[in-house]
Image: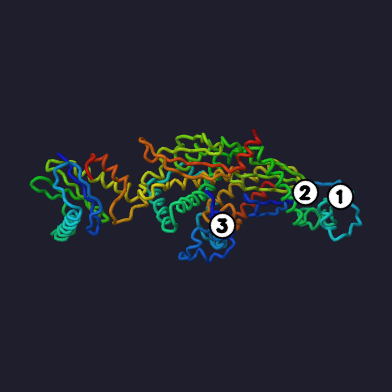
Amino acid sequence: MAYAQPHPRLSVVSNSSQSSVDHLSPTTTSTRFSLPSVPSTHTAVSTKPGLNRPNIYDRNLNKTRGSEVSGAAFAFLFSEVVQYTQKRVSGINDLERQLNTLGYRIGTRVLELMVWRAEGSSKAPKREIKLLSVLMMIHTQVWRAVWGKAADAIERSVENPDEYMIIDNDPPIERHISVPRDMSQLSCSSFTAGIVEAVLDGLAFPARVTAHNTPNAQFPNRTTILIKLEPSVMEREELLK
Amino acid sequence: MSHHLFLLSPSDTPLYSLTHHSTKPVPSVTSPLASNLPTWSTSAFAGTLTALSGASSATQHTSGGAVRVGGGQDRHVIQMIANAGLDVIEDVMRRENTMYLKSVDKFNEWTVSAFITPGNMKFVLLHEAKNDEGIRQFFMEVWEVYVKTMLNPFQTAHTAIRSSVFDNRVRASARKYL
Amino acid sequence: MAIFGLWVINKAGGLVYQRNFADGLALLTSNEYLVLAGTLHGIHAITSRLSPMGPSSGVQVIEAETFKMNILLTVTGTKFVLLTSLADTTADAVLQKIYDIYADAVMKNPFHTPEMPIRSEGFDSRIGTLIGTGQT
């Protein structure tokens, strides 16, 4: 599936240089997903040294390493995210793409923070550069960091060598969601797909990642995250053989 | 002795840069290219040419950490060297799985070391003296503050880092290790 | 001992969910159910406003000759009504579990609009597992 317009998260580059007027007005619909340029809040904190506001820079990044988030709180939050997004899109594809974009924002942070926690104290921190180990890392570590459990399976497509599938039998994100029949194509796990896409992008394996409902008798919420790697990645893998 | 740090986004846009003059003494560097350069060179490009050749201009050997003008210290020359180093970095990061790539490139008195975060952010440091361990520790601290910066929901991998707290932290690390 | 049916009435008195389980209950049209639910809402209001000892949560059980209606009122004004046989003693516990399922499968579902009829497969199937299948 190709993007008709520039990918929304790329628009971040151009929007960031614009004035911040747009984001202050919630009524402007065109820039609802653009990120504002930041300076105001930052300088406000630093120019008042007497102000004892908690600062992320003073926090140990490992402080919340093992802490858990309330499942109910997340379910309500995500429910609102879906409702908010649904009001502002035209159709299921658009909704899935926006959820993907939101997930992408999470993914870039998950990747950086997760690897920092694993490698930050190492003498020689490592990056993953092999495709298979990257996929395994997503299946196990990323899933564990985000959902508290590893994914259930990872498979390579038989027909298309550039396609991989990560399967979750019971995604926590879908546990309380019943998609109405007229939208049965929709998978809210597009959000997860966005996270996966960000992780792959960050490690220089650009891919198009989508989510699909693949229920079976035992697991009505079973979901497949489909990873379609870009041709450039496949060419590179071919050369490395 | 000065150091130049650049933080580059995955699309190689500079998001942050820092020039740090350390109080440690400058090692005496003699550039073989520079001595071969005719001293009478007066063309319009003479300045850049001299700089690229690594020739020491008259002001270069001031003692201590004073700011030196001209020579290999020109801003645009520094940026060019950092940019040139990127090609080598791109090449090496496909093969090496370490984040810290020490001394990937050399140009005259400058050595280029780099650090690649998992999110493909590149930290590029131009330095004169060999200081592998110090630079490693410096990069690790910059990585930590960078991760913290990224946790800000208004920060993306493509927005320039304007936080003054970030700036102060990086400067403090530079004073400590470089 | 049997559970005949379940109603969910929103805070405005509208019937948003109605399902029958065991046989034996008189079958009515959906319009009649709506009217009955509205009436019950009114009766509930009377019982809660007439209370002599200050505010009251209103009627909890209505016993008829052949069955009883157990009513659970939530803090947000939603009422769960469970129609059971007279001998049934589990109604309170079952109502609490229904409330749990409602909170999970209905309120956390982004495709549910508050105060509107409940159309959620998750809610249907979990209620089915709790009470047993029956005709809807």
Q: Position of residue A29 (x, y in %)?
A: 47, 63
Does mark 1 fall on the same chain as mark 2? yes
Residue hosting label 2: B25
Chain label for disc 3 = A
N-terminal-most mark, 2 or 1 = 2
Question: Which numbered tag is attached to residue A11?
Answer: 3
Q: What element carries label 2?
A: loop
* Residue furthest out toward the left: C65
User: Is residue A156 visible from the viewing direction of this image?
Assistant: no
Q: Nearer the viewer, mark 1 or mark 3?
A: 3
Secondary structure type for disc 1 = helix
| Label 3, residues with CA under 10 Å away: few <14, some 14-19, many ≥20 | some
Tag 1 near tag 3, CB within 8 Å: no
Return the residue nearer the eye: B173 or A69.
A69
Q: Check disc 1 and report the residue beneath it.
A: B34
Q: Would you place residue B81 above or below residue B94 in this image? A: below
- B28 on left or right of C125: right
Gap between marks 2 and 3, in whole Å?
46 Å
